[in-house]
Image: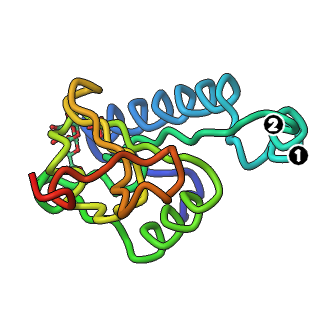
Amino acid sequence: MKSSSPRHTSTRDYNYEIVSVDTDVAYRTWMAKYPSALSSFEQITNFAKGKRIALFLDFDGTLSPIVDNPDFAFMSTNMRATAAKVAKYFPTAIISGRSRDKVYNFVGLADLYYAGSHGMDIMGPIRESFDDPPNCIISTNKQGK
Ligand SMILES: O=P(O)(O)OC[C@H]1O[C@H](O[C@H]2O[C@H](CO)[C@@H](O)[C@H](O)[C@H]2O)[C@H](O)[C@@H](O)[C@@H]1O
């Protein structure tokens, strides 16, 4: 007779299943406490009305996937295009535990703010001229210094 319930061939399999159930419960509990912002989008947009918006983003695990080798945490083309688009509407900053240069090299968007080393090293968008929006800083290189 064929059994319809899952087979447990070893204690190891059984323990693995308990860990999976625990992980699932922990995940559901966490999601109940911190629901996806996308499911409350209307509430967020209503709350944001009349306010000045700035966007602060994490890099690893947010803009890039978590990978084994930190040197390969590349952003997708879609994610880069989305970050560039959102930065046209709101001041947008990336805050990271990585060094600022490393994050900038991964992202490569000049219109964003970058806060590296957990906020110890901050760079604003590169300003081509004094006529650019005031939320930019002047690039020291562009001034010839
Ligand atoms: O503040 P973040 O931008 O989230 O940076 C936190 C740390 O991110 C990196 O490590 C994490 O991502 C790696 C690549 O996916 C992954 O291999 C590692 O296990 C994660 O901890 C980065 O290497 C660290 O320097 C950052 O502090």
**Location of residue 56 with respect to 73 vertically, above or below:** above
Give the number of marks.
Answer: 2
| Residue with the mark numbered 1 | 42
* Coordinates of residue 103 in the picture (x, y in percent): 23, 50
Please state which amino acid type lies under the numbered disc 1: Glu
Query: Which residue is painted at 59% across and 58% down in the image?
Result: 4
Please state which amino acid type lies under the numbered disc 2: Ala
Q: Are marks 1 and 2 in contact (CB under 8 Å)?
A: no
> Colour scheme of this structure image?
rainbow
Mark 1 and mark 2: Cα distance apart in space: 10 Å
Mark whose residue sits in front, 1 or 2: 2
- 55 or 91: which is nearer to us? 91
**Secondary structure category for the residue under label 1:** helix
**Secondary structure category for the residue under label 2:** helix
Query: Residue 13's quadrant in the figure?
Result: top left
**Location of residue 101 with respect to 98 vertically, above or below:** below
Callout 1 environment at 10 Å: few (<14), some (14 to 19), or many (20+)? few
- Of labels 1 and 2, earlier in sequence is 1
Q: Mark 2 near ligand 1 (CB under 8 Å)?
A: no
Query: Which numbered tag is attached to residue 48?
Result: 2
Query: Which residue is painted at 33% across and 38% down in the image?
Result: 16
Drawn side of residue 119 relative to residue 111, left or right: left
* Coordinates of residue 51 in the picture (x, y in percent): 79, 33
**Location of residue 118 with respect to 109 vertically, above or below:** above
Callout 2 environment at 10 Å: few (<14), some (14 to 19), or many (20+)? few
- 88 or 48: which is nearer to us? 88
- 112 or 59: which is nearer to us? 112
